[in-house]
Structures are given as structure tokens and as C-alpha cells.
Image: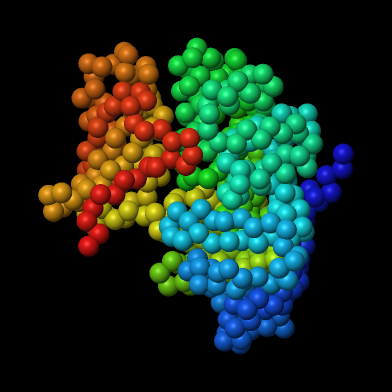
Amino acid sequence: MTDEYMQDDALSREEITALQVRRLRETVARAACSPWYEQALKEAGVGPEDIETVEDVSKLPLTTKDDLRAGMPHGFLAVPLDEVVRMHYSSGTTGIATGVYHTHSDLRRWSECVARGMRAVGVDRSDVFQNMMGYGLFTGGLGFHYAGELIGCMTIPASAGNTQRQVHLMQTFQTTVVHILPSYALRVAAYCREHDIDPIADLSIGYAFLGGEPHSRKLVRRIEELFDCKVYNCYGLSEMCGPGVAMECTAQDGLHVREDQYIAEIVDPATLEPVSAGEQGELVLTTLRREAMPLLRYRTRDVTRLISEPCPCGNEHVKIGRLEGRTDDMLIVKGVNIYPQQVERVLMDSPHVGSNYVIVLDDADGTDEMVVQVELSQEAFVDEMRELHTIEEALVSQLRSEILITPKVELHEPNALPAAEGKAVRVIDKRDKA
């Protein structure tokens, strides 16, 4: 089988830049066919003829989620409706969901982007791929499904939930590759332990692709140890297509952006000006080959940085660092900016912590209070009950060093906290918003 779609990963830096300039001009022309961008580009006084370098992307107007909502349902559609073959609906976790349209070519290129990431780390047609993400309006499931079939894997559309069945499928068909939420990977490992199944000896997982939730490197390492597999981060969002915008390679040090399909910028979320090289800020993406719904300089709200140093894997497409969170997920507690992933990093570094935690914020006494509810590991619950106060004090101290405020820590027995088979709810904010 010849993987022709892998050829773009072998482009040189010069070839990538030349391709981006040409495709950016084409994208601006295509975007102007939509009612929204026809007006926005006219107001900005920008057209395809103004694009001479990749840096000229900064001349284009920024696009926000609120713009997409205002343009619903067809304001951003750049092709006749009869050319649209699929519509996905964004999750709407921070507001009203929005529709995203795809042509046949859009879907093919999306599948190829995901397949490129999977093939780059070693997945091939001999693998058995179990897709444990939700299917339907959510893009995670279908994005990986068609990529698995494109590679030639035997693809099991398990979808999300029903842990007993998931583990049964893994054992019966000797699943070697999974696509899974990070929090659910921990739930599967816990289920195995509860039912005397060894996640390493009794399963055959070699690769796990994580997505759908922000997660820390500490959590990745824990999952790798639990299943004795390699874990790779996958980044995407419905507005771009879904998973596959950027994926980790074998170096596991940043995610390669598919720059033949996207231009990535990092801006200061307050000033919207570009940040210095390597500095952290908000990721802004521009599609380069999207037909149905091209997007110019879309503000993702995701916080990361660009990594331009050469990668050991040889791929010259720029990388983004692991996501530190979202600008709209940042918590302000007692005047301090905190990302939930900072808490996760501390918890996942402790051998006493199990698979679940929740951050509860309240202001019942008029001041902010943060309570971190933590499940103990099975070993800590059985062997170290007399040392709970010591464990609690250690976690409080470590969290204080990371987030610069002193939270309360509540220790719970294994499986005591609500477990979600979809995206985990990590923050419960009870504070008065008035």
C-alpha cells in the first residue's frame, strides 16, 4: 500500500513556506465567496493580491466563536449548499454550538491528516484499532475512524462508554491501538484492576492517542505505565475539522502542525499582537485547503507556544507545545490565575492519587475557597490509611508551590467521585457570579 498522503510530511521548510503562500492566496479568494468574509475582507481592505509572504496572514481579520454564532447557519459557507456532504456541530462547552460544513474533499483531507499522524508513530495495516471516542456530531470519533480505515487497520467503532464491553473487545480482538479520552483511559485501567485483569499482560495495547480533554505530561506517563504503551497527544477542534490539526511524533515533545493545511500563529490574548518566538500565548489558526467553510485567523482560545527547533523525527512542520489550557478555562482564585492542568500535574505525580479528582470553588464565607477532591489509589487506600493526614499535607504543600495559593484537599476512597465516560468534569464553580 502506497501512502501518498504521507508525502507532505517530507516537505522542506522552504517548500512548506512556498506552499503556504500560494494556498493562503487561494483561501482568501475562496473565503470571500462566503457572506461573512465578503464583508469582513472588504472592510479590512484585503484581498488575495495582498498576500506575498506567510507573515501577511496578519493583514487578515481575526475570527471568533461569537462570529461563527452570529453567522449561523450559512454565513460562513463558501460553496453552494448542494456541495456539502456532512455537517458537524461543535460541542458548545462555552456557549451555543455552531455548525461546521464539509465537502467530499474536506473529509478526505481531514482523514489524511489524522492518518499521517498515526502512521508517523508506527501504526500500520497490521494493527487493530479500537476507536473509543463518541460518534455523531462530535468530530473525535469519525475523524479517527476514517483515518484508521485509510491506513488499512481493522477498525472497531466502539464509541464511548460501556467499559465492560470495551475491555471485552480489547481482549477478544487483541486491540493494539486506541483513541481515548485521557480520563477514560484511567477509568479503563481501574476497571481492569477491579476485575483481576492485568492491563499489560491481558491486553495488547501498543499505541494510545489522547484527545478531547486538556491533560498533563504527568497523566500521559501514568497511562503509559498502566498499559505499557506509547501515548501520543492529538490536537484538533471542530471549527478546523476535528482531530488531526497537530499530532505528536515519536519524539513526544510537541505536536507537528500539518502546515500544508493550516497556518499557526501565537498571539497575546489581551493585545492580539504576535508574541516573541517560543513565548506562550493564544493559538490562532487559518485553514489552507478547506472548501466548504474556510476560516481566517480563528481564535482557538487554546494556550500554547510554537516550537521551531528541528525535530529528531525529521519532520520540518512547525510544532506547538503541549496545551496549557484555554483562555476561557483559566480560573481566577483569590486574584491568582490558575489552569486546572497545573493541579493535575501535581496530583498525577503522586503515587497516592488514583484516577479521579475534582476542583470545587466556592465563596460561601465571602472569600474564594478551592477544595481539591482526590481519589486515593487502591494501594494507598489499603496500605496507608494511617498516613492519610501526611498524604493530605504533602498534596497541599505541593499544590501551594505550583498554584501559589493554599487549597484544601479532601481524600476519598477509590471510585467515590462521580466518573464520566465522556469528557471529565474537572471544575465545579459554585461561586456567586452576580
- Whole-percent x and y of residue 273? 48, 72
- The residue that appears at 68% across and 21% down in the rendered structure is 174
- Whole-percent x and y of residue 302? 48, 57
Would residue 252 appear left or right of 119 to someone viewing this image? Answer: left
Would residue 362 appear left or right of 318 to someone viewing this image? Answer: left
Image quadrant containing the C terminus: bottom left
Image quadrant containing the N terminus: top right
* Visible residue check, residue 270: yes
Farthest-out residue, front: 82
Farthest-out residue, left: 365
Counting the numbered discs, the total is 0
| Front-lying residue, 220 or 139 | 139
- The residue that appears at 31% across and 13% down in the rendered structure is 383
- Whole-percent x and y of residue 181? 52, 38
* Visible residue check, residue 10: no
Question: In the figure, 337 relative to 392: above or below?
Answer: below
- The residue that appears at 78% across and 42% down in the rendered structure is 150
Would residue 289 appear left or right of 58 to someone viewing this image? Answer: right
Quadrant of res 95: bottom left
- Whole-percent x and y of residue 254? 57, 47
Would residue 78 appear left or right of 389 to someone viewing this image? Answer: right
Colour mode?
rainbow
| Front-lying residue, 263 or 312 | 263
Question: In the figure, 111 relative to 231: above or below?
Answer: below
